[in-house]
């Protein structure tokens, strides 16, 4: 049987590993951090750093294909790995999505709508950027942001000094505030032969910058749903993408605006584990090994709720209610803002 290499041993790596095992594959996880959630479900674990060239080469040579659960893998490590085994999704998807500036210009060149934006390094840049995109606006670090970290909101130009201080010198991007009614995401997959399959768009609600719930079906007209799926497919095709991608969208009276893309399985796709015959994790594994994709058809309504920090204390109640599918990540230490697990609350499909 083939072995799949996964960079990153968090909950996404863990659930990819379980899906791979279900399809008869072994996984080798590369994760420098201590006690990663994926360690108990992986066949092998390497805990070396991304600077350790020998460990990277040994890892690559022990697997047939390499994938990842996060987009901020150092370029130097990718160069070493790619000399030995294919990396899927490919480098172009990583290059585009690692930097919010590159990502926005890529999306605009594709003809897709984004928030108005301007690159910011200094306070003078930010003053000019606020003139250009207006206020309110959000200043975001160009790289490494997740769960709303590395962001500062500006209500008025008076907030400029504080926002610049919050960036601590990191290259940033100012985004005009999008007046959306709600947020949705498309979890899309593209296979080795170029076939594309999308899951039904989910409606996302955030709490304190972190995804709280994803509900399917989302509140969308048939036209919006079609638009969401078609624009996601365009992104994947342009990148000659192989694997699963999350495409986050704002729904506005002006149409769908792309917030960001994630070149990996996505938290807002966790509902597929109990809403579809083939979930996003199996879909990703199928794609990267060159198997045919599942069709993504949804067979039931689902509300996915993240269990963050102390939410883990709701588990006994969740277990008492029928139709709740519980997914825990095996994390020992409870921390504020830490994703401990999620629950998929299912209902018979309304279609
Ligand atoms: P993730 O954990 O999804 O990777 P992130 O840290 O990359 O999150 P974003 O997705 O950029 O952050 O922003 C988090 C949330 O903040 C969005 O889902 C949305 O609710 C809000 N937001 C971000 N950018 C804008 C914008 N330009 N206008 C209005 N709201 C925004
Ligand atoms: Mg993000
Ligand atoms: Mg986001």
Image (cartoon, helix red, strand yellow):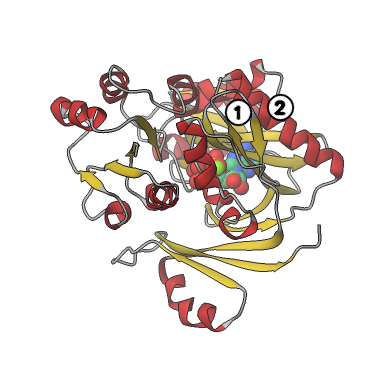
User: Is residue 326 shown left or right of residue 221?
Assistant: left
Q: Quadrant of residue 295?
A: top right
Q: Residue at x 50, y 43 (%)?
A: 265
Q: Earlier in the sequence, mark 2 or mark 1?
A: 2
**Going by the picture, which residue comes out furthest to the front?**
1
Residue 19 can be seen in this image? yes
Judging by the rendered image, the residue that carries numbered circle 1 is: 130
Q: Residue at x 32, y 43 (%)?
A: 27
Q: Nearer the viewer, residue 2 or 199?
A: 2
Vertical position of residue 280 compared to residue 239: above or below: below
Q: Nearer the viewer, residue 148 or 33?
A: 33
Q: Residue at x 41, y 41 (%)?
A: 69
Q: Quadrant of residue 296?
A: top right
Q: Residue at x 45, y 43 (%)?
A: 146
The percent position of residue 134, horizontal first and vertical second, equals 67, 30
Vertical position of residue 235 compared to residue 318: above or below: above
User: Is residue 238 shown left or right of residue 28?
Assistant: right
The percent position of residue 202, horizontal first and vertical second, equals 67, 50
Q: Of helix, strand and loop, which one carries label 1?
A: helix
Distance from the alpha carbon under mark 2 to that under mark 1:
19 Å
The percent position of residue 137, horizontal first and vertical second, equals 61, 37
The percent position of residue 49, horizontal first and vertical second, equals 19, 36
Residue 155 can be seen in this image? no
Q: Of helix, strand and loop, which one carries label 2?
A: loop
Placement of the N terminus among the 4 image quadrants: top left
Q: Nearer the viewer, residue 16 or 26?
A: 26
Q: Nearer the viewer, residue 140 or 98?
A: 98
Count the marks. 2
Judging by the rendered image, the residue that carries numbered circle 2 is: 113
């Amino acid at each position: 049987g083939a072995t799949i290499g996964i960079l990153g041993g968090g909950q996404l790596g863990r659930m990819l590993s379980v899906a791979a095992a279900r399809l008869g594959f072994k996984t080798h996880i590369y994760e420098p951090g201590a006690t990663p959630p994926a360690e108990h479900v992986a066949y092998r674990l390497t805990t070396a750093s991304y600077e350790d060239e020998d460990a990277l080469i040994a890892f690559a040579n022990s697997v047939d294909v390499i994938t990842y659960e996060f987009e901020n893998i150092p370029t130097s490590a990718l160069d070493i790995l790619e000399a030995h085994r294919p990396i899927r999704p490919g480098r172009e998807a990583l290059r585009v999505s690692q930097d919010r500036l590159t990502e926005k210009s890529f999306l605009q060149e594709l003809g897709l709508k984004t928030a108005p934006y301007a690159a910011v390094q200094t306070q003078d840049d930010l003053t000019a950027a606020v003139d250009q995109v207006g206020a309110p606006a959000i200043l975001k670090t160009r790289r490494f942001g997740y769960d709303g970290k590395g962001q500062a909101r500006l209500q008025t130009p008076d907030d400029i000094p504080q926002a610049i201080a919050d960036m601590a010198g990191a290259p940033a991007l100012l985004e005009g505030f999008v007046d959306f009614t709600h947020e949705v995401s498309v979890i899309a997959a593209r296979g080795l032969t170029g076939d594309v399959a999308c899951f039904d768009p989910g409606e996302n609600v955030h709490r304190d910058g972190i995804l709280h719930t994803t509900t399917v079906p989302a509140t969308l007209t048939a036209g919006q749903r079609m638009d969401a799926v078609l624009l996601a497919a365009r992104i994947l095709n342009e990148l000659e993408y192989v694997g699963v991608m999350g495409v986050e969208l704002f729904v506005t009276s002006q149409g769908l605006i792309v917030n960001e893309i994630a070149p990996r399985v996505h938290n807002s796709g966790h509902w597929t584990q109990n809403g579809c015959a083939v979930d996003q994790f199996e879909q990703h594994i199928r794609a990267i090994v060159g198997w045919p994709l599942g069709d993504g058809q949804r067979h039931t309504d689902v509300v996915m709720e993240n269990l963050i920090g102390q939410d883990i204390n709701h588990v006994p109640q969740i277990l008492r209610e029928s139709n709740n599918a519980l997914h825990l990540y095996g994390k020992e230490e409870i921390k504020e803002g830490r994703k401990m697990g999620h629950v998929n609350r299912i209902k018979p499909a309304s279609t």
